[in-house]
Structure formats: C-alpha cells, structure tokens
Image: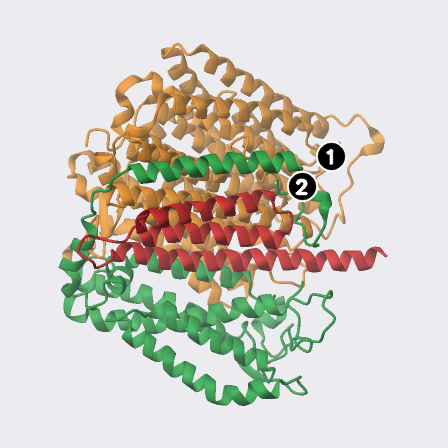
Chain colours: A orange, B green, C red
Amino acid sequence: MDSLLNVDILLPMLVGLPLIAAILTTLAKGHGLRASISIAVALIQLIIVVALLSWLSNGGTSLEAQHQRYSLGGWGAPLGIDLTIDGFSALMLALTATLTLVLTVYSRYYFFEPHAQLDKTARFWPLWWLLIVGINGLFLSGDIFNIYVTLEIIGLAAVALVALDGSRAALTAALRYLLVGLLGSLCYLLAVALLYRTYGTLDLAQLSVIAEPTAITWAALALITTGLLLKTALVPLHFWLPLAHGSAPAPVSAILSALVVKTSFYLLARFWLDALAPASTDYGLIMLGILGAAAIFWGSIQALRATRLKLMVAYSTVAQLGYLFLLFPLVLSTGDTRDAGLTGPAVSAIAYFIVAHACAKAAMFLVAGNIMRTFGHDDIARLHGLAKYMPLSLFTFAIAGASLIGLPPSAGFISKWLLLNVAIDAAQWWWVIIILSGGLMAAMYVFRVLNIAFISVDEKAQIEPKHLPTNKLPTIMPLCAFFLAMLTIALGFNAELILDLVTIGDDV
Amino acid sequence: MFHTPDLKEHNHANELSVVTRILCAIAIGTLSLSLIIVLILTDNPSSSLPALVQHQLTQSGVQNPVTAVLLNFRSYDTLLEIGVLLIVAVAMLPNSNFNSDINPDIPSDNLSGGRLVSVVTNAQVNPTLEAVLRWLVPMIVVMAGYMLWTGASLPGGAFQSGALLAGAGVLVQLSGRLQFCFTSTIAKLLITIGLITFMIVAVGVATTTGVILQYPTELAGPLILLIEIAATLSIATILLLLYNSLATQIFEMSPEPSAFNKQPSAQE
Amino acid sequence: MSQDLLYIIASIGLFGIGLYGLIVAPHIIRKILAINIMSIGVFMLLVASASTVNGTPDPVLHAMVLTGIVVAIAGTALALFLAGKIHTLGQASDKDGH
C-alpha cells in the first residue's frame, strides 16, 4: 500500500484523469454540467503537473533513475509498458496542462451561442479530453508501440474536432488531415515492425542502448521520419495544415497549432537524438535543417499572401515549425552530445521556443476566433478600424506577434537569442542569417494586420459588427487570449524557470 | 495531391498526368525494392520476449499467451485502444439538440423517446431475413459468449465476440423491424462501460498491489474476464453505432428504396 | 523461396501498391481502400515476423496486430463518414444552386 502513495503515481494519473473526464462528459447531460466537469478536471490536472514538477526539480537528480519510470502492471520493460519522464517531457506536460486550462475556460464560453439549436458541446468535450489523453500519453510513453496508439488517438481526435463545424470546408480539411495522418501512422508502424524484427524489444530506453548504425535501423529511422514529418507538417509535406487549422473552431485551432504538431516533433527529436541516435547521419540532420529553413521562407511568404486572418495564422505556424527543425543541424555543431539524450544548449533553446510559440500562437488563434464571433468574418482586407471595437484583442495580437517576431522582452526573443547563441558558437553563419530573416518576415505579416486594424485610412471599408448588442462577446474570451499573451512576456522575464526545467535529469 | 475529395466515378479532370504517375510508380517501386533487400539481408537475432511471456504465463491468470499480453502484460495499450473506439463513437454520434438533451421528453431528431431499441411501425420489413433472424440471433449471441469465455485458453476474447454481436445487430437493423437510437442514456452507458470497468479495475488493484494495472495473481483470471465482458458490450455497441451512422446517411443517387428510408437521417 | 522471403516481398509490395493508390487514385473511396491495403501490408509483416525457432509464435506481435486492426477500423469508419457527409452537403448545395 505504501508504494501507492509514491510520487510517481502522478504519472499514470496524468493519463487517467483526462480519460475520466472524457467518460464523464460523454455521459453528462447538459452543456453546463459538461463545462463545469471540464474546468474542474483541467484545474486538477494543472495541480498534478505542478506537484510533479516541484518533486522533479527538488529531488529528481538525487533519486535513483527508476523513480523517473513507472512500470504499468508491475511487469517492467520489455514485457510491459513503462511511463517515463525527463526534463524535456516534463516541460511539455506543463505546457499542455496550462494551455488546457486556459483553452477549457475559453471553450466553455465559445460554444454556447445564444441562438444555436445544435449542441456541439456533446461532441466537443469528450473529444477534447480524449485528445488530451493522447497528448499526455505520448509525452509519458516509453514504448514505441504505445507511442503508435497515442499517435492514433491524437490524430483521430484532432480530425473529429476539426470536423466539428460541419461545414463543407471544415469536413474537406478534416478528411485530408485524416488521410495524411493515417499515412503517417502507417509509416511509423512499419518502422516499429522493422525495429522489433531487428532488436526484439519495444522499449525506448533499451533501444537507445542496443541500437546500431545498420542499414535496417537507418531504414526504420527514415520511415519514422517520413511519417512524423507528415504529422508535423514540415515543408513540403505541409499541404494539409493551413486549411485544417484555418477551418477548425478557434480553441481547436489553438491546441492543434500549439501542441498537436509539437507532439510529433517531440518524437522526432526523441528518435533522432536519443533512441536511434547511432543511426542518425550527419547528412540526415542537415537535410532536416534545410527543410526547416525552407519552411520558414515558404510559410512566411504564404502568410503575407493570405486573405483570411485564420489562414494567415496557420501559415505562420508552418513558418515557425521550421525553426524547430534547426535543432537537428545545431546539435551537430555541439559535437558528441548526440549520445547524451535530449539535453544540451540546442535542446534547451528549442524547448523554450516551443513554449513561446505555443502561447503566442494559441493567443493569436483565440483573437481570430473572437473577431470571427463578433463580426462574422475574418477577411483581413475588411478589418479596417478594428481597434475601435476590440482594443484588448488587438493588443493581445500585437504582443503575440511581438513574440513570434522575437522582440524583447517576450519569450520569443529569449528563444531566438538562445538559438542564435548556439549557432554563433558553432560558427554556422547561414543558420544565423536564416533565423534573423525569419524574424523579419514575421514582422512583415504581423504588421500588415496591425496596420489595417489600427490605421483606418479607407473610410468606406470600415468594419461593421454583425448585430452589435446581441453579439457582445463575454469578457472572459478576450481575457483568455490576453492571459496567454502576457504569459509570453512573463516567460521572457523568467527564462531561468524553463531552462532549469529542461536540464532536469542531466546528471542522472 | 489531395485537393477536393472526388466523389464521382470517371471524373478524369482531377487525375494526375501519365508522366507523374509513372514517375510515382518508379519512385515507390525503387523504395520498396530497397526495403525488401534490406530486410532480406538482415539476419534477426531471436527476440527474448516470447520466452519471457511463456515464463510469466502462469502468473498472468490465463493460458492463451495472446490474451495474456493483451490484457495483462500490455493492458495499457488495450485501455488506450478502447479509448480510440470511444473517439470515433463520439465523432459519429447523431446530433443532439440543446433542449432535448436535458429533457428527453422533448422530441429530438431521433423519435424513439430515449430507448435503445424500438419497434418501427409501418416499416419496410424483409420477411425472409426476419424469419431467419429469429433462429440466427440467439445462436450468434451464444457463439459470442463462447468466444468470450474461451479467449482465456484458445483464440478468442473481447474483440472477437464484440464483432460477432455487432454483426448480429447489423442483421437485425437490415431486417427493418427494429431501430436503434444511440443518443439514449442506456446506449451511452453501454458505449462507456468498457472503459469505466477497465479504469475501475486499474485503480482498484492499485490499492492492493500498489501499482496501477497490476492484478493480484490469484484474482488475475476473474478480473480479466470482467474487463473482457464489459469491453465486449462496449465494442459491440460502438461497432453497431459506426455501422448505423454510415448506413443512415441518405445518398440520393441510389434510386432503389432501402430499409433506411423511413428512419431519421443523420445529416446536419 | 522460403516462407519468410515470400511474406517480406508480399507485405512491402502491398505497402507500395497501397501508397501508389493513395497518391494516384482520384476517387476518395479508392484512397480509403488504398490506406486499408497499406495497413494490411504492415500487419502481414508483423505476423510473419512472429515465427520463432521452437514453433510457438510470438504473442506480442499478434497483440500488436489486433490493436492495429481495431485502430484501422476506427480510422476507416471516420474517413467514410466524413466522405459521406461531404457528398451529402455537395448534393444539397447542388440542388439549392439550381
């Protein structure tokens, strides 16, 4: 009994709690009850994650390594499935819990339209919590087949959430996302088959010990990369993302851009730098970096050309995801830390970038959702003079944009600065140029929107709200977006917090 | 590659050009061939896992090693997999209205008044099928029960018997006399009972053994059977729900009357 | 030709054929079928890898295939559902447009 009260019971609780929420919201009648259950569970989840983090950072490095693994069923790898946690995944879990709480509160108000007949919350809440089950399960998983199941949970739940609107555009985007997601998962599963045939184990930790740079390991890594690149929407496999993220309801777009695409990136980092590190070739790492640079340029150009606000934000995600892939060539430069797992200055910089981008992008999507709700459209060309009606939302957009561009004192600035540091230390000047020009292009597409909204030059194109009295937004909706944007500023001032977190488990 | 999904046969406007297709075929062919060669040239060391499973089989509570792996050693995967089924079940549930959700007396899109199975009046009944089903459905239920029970020692188990039961449900629906309503309370309970039981067992055993999903050795067999029974009910209901949602989408292209014309549609 | 070789060629072949169909076939139902063919290829490789020296097959691989089949069913059902709804909406808008 006393081993039940151990702290690592919190690990399976992070998967079990959203699962309970999913069951309860399926059975509950009435949208108010479902929303209340959801907000309560989101709060409890945040408390659990905070408890987990404080335990990890206080005593983590002095405990034996096995306390950072939880063997489900008591069997232990390779027979059973283990849950594992280290600094990087702990940070991702914290990000998930925070975003879940804010977006849950937002969704409670977003889905209740006074004149709607159809109750979308009956489908939204169970799918939302099942998505969170998948995300938490993926970050905690230590078994490659278990990762496949969590990838499918995330994929199917995300598709169902994108299709929630029921409009033709949303359904088409959802179907495309589904086909791409299934293709990616199948490539990953084929790789799992190859790895099991060769090494006889499904456990990540064991694989990192016994992996060898043979042809079949390289083939498995290539398949995993193809599958996960499809899911992370890296150029040129990004074609499904803009419409999927652009046609989904606002909180769904927020979590898709902020978290779901990051889960497959996390897996890529885990496989390239940790589990199958012996098989990762220099050529492959540089190739990923080049694709990332292409993503930065292509995404920014398309964002400049976008006509709808949500599409612009979605293309901005494509561009910002390119920065993440600079992790791979920058790790090359730091030499032999490739075998040390997910640690090092490049990993810290990318982890910081993920957090900064998640908060900023979620804030932007929520602002776009607020604009859509109030005015009935989000055409950028017709947003002249928006600042008059929604000053808080525009301010939020500006701050989130500042984080994407990389202006101080936002978290985006710190993360870009860390990346530049690593690149300059390694004397890889071309990455420095790419990072800086990416920031410049982000400035262009953000300022384009702010220009139109704040400076109402064209009197005839003034924006008109749909039906001004009845469509008044509940104040909490812009406040949620504002909170997320403020979070990027707060993280900009407290860089130590995140960086200490990522380096947990270094000495173990 | 994936622009607008094409739903008309023989629409040649969206087809890729012949050159692209040949290039595609060559690329895929080369990749497949190289993968086959790599697979052939790798000699595999035998995995230690089968021996491990055999070794621990007596403590797992069942004699069938596949059931032991599915429901004991790697039960977490099965738990998540039932979660996957729940995702698609929720995604394909018929719509509910705000008002009828709270007060089931207000008629919603489904006219069955809150019951899972109801008799359709003036239905287009298929008399031959209905007559056969009087004999066939009880036999199917018995077979499903047998497959569930025998999963402990022979091939079988929750998924197989759930699929059998769903098949029986499909036949019943095709005969036209009965109609299923999946937004009723009992249907939602059936859909979630598998997951609920699994979680109760997972947490309940932790109070005795201290680890989530670690069954006490003497109770392992009965606990696995309990989970499988609940899972069978859930899987059967969900599979039937999937079939129902797909079959009641009315496609106006088909001229012949179907057994579903009288049923409420699942459209927006 | 040994059995192992036969299954390797068949499974990767199915995967390749399915991949080609997914990219090239214009009709959505064919794309969904292509995904199914690809998944069958992967499952075949998994089951074929389960032969051990002493005769009893590897149960972990069988469990993986069972899980994989259920996931494939779920994905196919969702894809068909979405395709059907798009078709229905398209029909409705065609009627309104005339």
The one of B183 and B79 positioned closer to us in this rendering = B79
Please determine whether, in this image, residue A492 is positioned above or below residue A464: above
Q: Amino acid at mark 2?
A: Ile
Please determine whether, in this image, residue C14 is positioned above or below residue B83: above
Helix, strand or loop at label 2? It is helix
Indicate the chain on which mark 2 is placed: A
Q: Quadrant of the N terminus of chain B?
A: top right
Q: Residue A383 got which mark? A: 1
A309 horizontally vs A159: left or right: right
B63 horizontally vs B113: left or right: left
Q: Position of residue A89 (x, y in %)?
A: 34, 38
The one of A45 and B93 positioned closer to us in this rendering = B93
Tally the marks.
Answer: 2
Residue at numbered disc 2: A371
Contact check, label 2 and label 1, Cβ < 8 Å: yes
Residue at the spot 47% in from the left edge and 89% down from the top edge: B135
Q: Position of residue B60 (x, y in %)?
A: 19, 64
Q: Position of residue A336 (x, y in %)?
A: 26, 20
Indicate the chain on which mark 1 is placed: A
Residue at the spot 33% in from the left edge and 69% down from the top edge: B197
Q: Position of residue A301 (x, y in %)?
A: 63, 25
Q: Residue A261 got which mark? A: none
Helix, strand or loop at label 1? It is loop
In three-dimensional space, the C-alpha distance between marks 2 and 1, rounded to whole angstroms, equals: 9 Å
Q: Quadrant of the C terminus of chain B?
A: bottom right
Q: Amino acid at mark 1?
A: Leu
